[in-house]
């Protein structure tokens, strides 16, 4: 699909109204005689009325042979805002593959299977994305990450591998929150009434909120990934652990403060988060300096350095959220 721009003259009628001609090829392609006009302070968007009807997608297993790829299609269509997703096949779907698609509904908030036969099944997404604002979605996502962070710190401090295994399993639920947030933003970008109800004012904001969703997802990933390294630790080193825990504390503060600043639209608070990054880098240098003294084995040193790196990455995405707030507030128009 190509995007083009051109100048068109606005004509004023005697009664005070204005008219403008529309591109002939576009009108003939959409085959609509009713359009929805979306008004932004700086532009107008015309969209076909059918854009706002129920949306359906089809995943054809006769064409997509790889079941893993097919499930990826389903999850992607969910995030794109589809109301119904049909999985179909020319032949009966194998029991094991069918079970995977049944289980997939648990990975999509609000999804249920409303119709099923031997060669197809239909998901319907029943949850109204306007039940909570996009900022409430952000806050709840961050609360989930906070729980993972707190328990991860305890697992590192006590070298509790059973706890780390549980955290890694629990963190998978965070993907559902990420997919829901992307779905919420995608629907809002297509329907101005939804955007208004969840607190998104224009397309530029929708892009920024989508960026925030991605950053939150990455912060969850890096926080949870610390537990992969806990499972690899053969022995506990008190000094290295202390360095890592200080990095964890800074990462926690930066994440929470960046989210709070974004929700409150407080640029001063966001700038304070950015300044903390130099402290985090200094703490990482201290950790690495200790690990190269020869007081810990190479293997243990590598594991602790990787844990520190994960917390530093969380801090980096916190800076990204602060930058996103600046882009939101310091727009040229």
Image: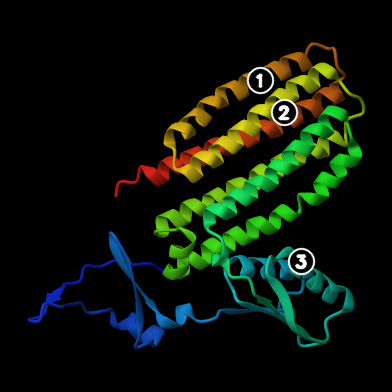
Disc on res. 106: 3
Please report whichever mark, 1 or 3, sits nearer to the chain's N-terminal start.
Answer: 3
When the figure is inspected, residue 266 is found, relative to residue 13, above or below; the finding is above
Image quadrant of residue 42?
bottom left
When the figure is inspected, residue 153 is found, relative to residue 221, above or below; the finding is above
When the figure is inspected, residue 141 is found, relative to residue 317, above or below; the finding is below
Query: How many numbered callouts?
Result: 3
Q: How far is the residue under mark 3 from the one under mark 2? A: 33 Å
Q: Which residue is mark 1?
A: 283
- For this view, does 134 lie left or right of residue 61? left
Q: Position of residue 184 (x, y in %)?
A: 55, 63
Please report whichever mark, 3 or 2, sits nearer to the chain's N-terminal start.
Answer: 3
At horizontal 48% and vertical 34% (from top left) the residue drawn is: 270
Q: Position of residue 310 (x, y in %)?
A: 70, 34
Please report whichever mark, 2 or 1, sits nearer to the chain's N-terminal start.
Answer: 1
Residue 30 shows in this picture? yes
Specify how the rendered protein is coloured. rainbow
Looking at the rendered structure, the secondary structure element under dot 1 is helix
At horizontal 68% and vertical 69% (from top left) the residue drawn is: 110
Q: How far is the residue under mark 1 from the one under mark 3? A: 40 Å
Residue 1 shows in this picture? no
- For this view, does 266 lie left or right of residue 144? left
At horizontal 72% and vertical 28% (from top left) the residue drawn is: 308
Residues marked 2 and 1 touching at CB (< 8 Å)? yes
Q: Which residue is mark 2?
A: 308
Q: How far is the residue under mark 2 from the one under mark 1? A: 9 Å
| Of the two numbered discs 3 and 2 in the rendering, the one whose residue sits closer to the viewer | 3
């Amino acid at each position: 699909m190509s995007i083009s721009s051109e100048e068109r003259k606005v004509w004023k009628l005697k009664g005070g109204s204005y008219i403008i001609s529309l591109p002939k090829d576009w009108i003939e392609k959409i085959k609509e005689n009713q359009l929805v006009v979306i008004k932004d302070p700086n532009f107008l968007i015309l969209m076909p009325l059918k854009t706002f009807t129920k949306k359906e997608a089809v995943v054809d297993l006769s064409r997509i042979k790889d079941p893993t790829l097919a499930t990826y299609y389903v999850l992607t269509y969910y995030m794109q805002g589809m109301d119904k997703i049909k999985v179909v096949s020319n032949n009966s779907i194998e029991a094991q593959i069918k079970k995977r698609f049944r289980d997939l509904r648990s990975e999509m908030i609000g999804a249920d299977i409303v119709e099923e036969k031997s060669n197809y099944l239909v998901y319907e997404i029943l949850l109204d994305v306007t039940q909570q604002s996009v900022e409430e979605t952000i806050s709840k996502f961050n609360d989930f990450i906070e729980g993972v962070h707190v328990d991860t710190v305890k697992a590192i401090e006590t070298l509790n591998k059973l706890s780390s295994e549980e955290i890694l399993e629990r963190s998978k639920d965070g993907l559902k929150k990420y997919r829901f947030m992307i779905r919420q933003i995608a629907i809002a970008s297509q329907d101005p009434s939804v955007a208004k109800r969840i607190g998104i004012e224009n397309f530029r904001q929708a892009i920024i909120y989508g960026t925030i969703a991605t950053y939150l997802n990455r912060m969850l990933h890096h926080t949870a990934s610390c537990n992969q390294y806990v499972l690899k630790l053969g022995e506990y080193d008190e000094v290295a652990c202390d360095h890592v825990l200080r990095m964890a504390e800074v990462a926690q503060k930066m994440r929470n403060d960046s989210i709070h600043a974004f929700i409150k639209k407080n640029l001063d608070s966001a700038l304070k988060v950015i300044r903390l990054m130099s402290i985090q880098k200094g703490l990482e240098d201290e950790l690495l300096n200790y690990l190269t003294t020869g007081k810990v084995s190479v293997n243990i040193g590598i594991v602790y350095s990787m844990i520190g790196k994960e917390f530093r990455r969380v801090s980096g995405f916190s800076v990204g959220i602060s930058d996103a707030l600046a882009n939101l507030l310091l727009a040229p128009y």
